[in-house]
Amino acid sequence: MGKRIQLPAGIDPHVHLRDPGGTHKETFLTGTAAALAGGYSCVLDMPNNQPPIADLEALSAKERAAAAAVCDYGFWWGGTAANADLAPQAAARCVGMKVYMTHTYGPLLVDDAPALVRLFQAWPAGRPIAVHAEGSATLAAILLGQLYGKWVHICHVSEAWQIAAIRRAKEQGFRVTCEVTPHHLFLTEDDARALGSLGQMRPPLGTAADRQALWDNLDVIDVLATDHAPHTLEEKRSANPPPGVPGLETALPLMLTAVAEGRLTLERLVALYHDAPARLFGISAPDSFVVVETGVRAAIRGDTLQTKCRWTPFEGMAVGARVLETWVRGTRAWGDGRILVAPGFGQRVRRGE
């Protein structure tokens, strides 16, 4: 028999719920159900939908789709080379702007310096600019933020040199924050080879030394983010598999297992998955908490998940904790292995100042 612990419910600032445009992979209903099953009360959805959330019509379509959510949610705006003029209107409806400086598809890829300057100039100061910036683009993003007085949030750090550069930027007083994913904390390039196309993701899994550097520099990392990015098994096993893995339901059991192993304290974990996201992104989650059971032994299984894709790169991995209940705004929303609230229970959050 394990030990029951009550903790603040999670806030995940980086998910891809695929709705609209990719509802065969995930919907707002299935994705937010996965969030509740994983101990999260709120998720912030990224803009790389089909079509991307880079104009006001597409944003309105996403707002309509989100009416089915069962946990709280917010949206990121997608910056492009052509939409800097929409920044004030988008900022009023979204928690921040996402800029893909490397490795994405279609108009969301912005790797042109003049376009990046226009976006950084136009976005309101004090609102986050989240960047997908692999390789040297990380340095460019940090410099752009410093030049134009903007807050840059580096998504899914994965390499030793990258976390060292972010540490240096923080020491110099730059306004930069960053996040790490469980898959980069627990898996390496060796796992990617074993997983085959199921281990394909952006950024790719790093070396064992990269993974250790992330653990060694948890004091530099602000936020734990899942980068929940589901695709169907058929897509992942195709001749052209898309990058991305699901993660909402496995993050907290994995991290609580790391706590039990002494890799971080429970207080630091709570800061990473709740306190810092709430503070940084201006999200209030009153009476939202998760009840977990620790000291158990279980294996992660994709066929038990709420996410529509129902697979995981952590298949078979042993964990020592599980989520029993998730409460949102005083309501028991997940318990007894099922969703306990109706579609539409979730509420929209906007960036607090």
Image: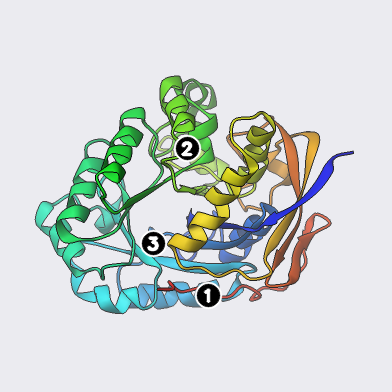
Please name the residue shown 28% across and 36% down the image: 165
Instruction: Name which residue type carries label 2.
Output: Leu
Residue 101 shows in this picture: yes
Instruction: Name which residue type carries label 3.
Output: Pro
Please name the residue shown 46% across and 68% down the image: 282
| Displayed quadrant of residue 168 | top left
Please name the residue shown 66% across and 75% down the image: 345
**Residue at the disc numbered 1:** 348
User: Disc 3 on helix, strand or loop?
Assistant: loop
**Residue at the disc numbered 2:** 218
> If you read the primary sequence from the N terminus, does the residue marked by circle 1 or circle 2 appear first?
2
> If you read the primary sequence from the N terminus, does the residue marked by circle 3 or circle 1 appear first?
3
Is 317 located above or below residue 90 in the figure?
Answer: above
Residue mark closest to the camera, 3 vs 1: 1
Mark seen at residue 206: none
State how far apart marks 1 and 2 are (Cα): 30 Å
**Residue at the disc numbered 3:** 47
User: Disc 2 on helix, strand or loop?
Assistant: loop
Mark 1 touching mark 2, by CB under 8 A?
no
Residue mark closest to the camera, 2 vs 3: 2
| Displayed quadrant of residue 53 | bottom left
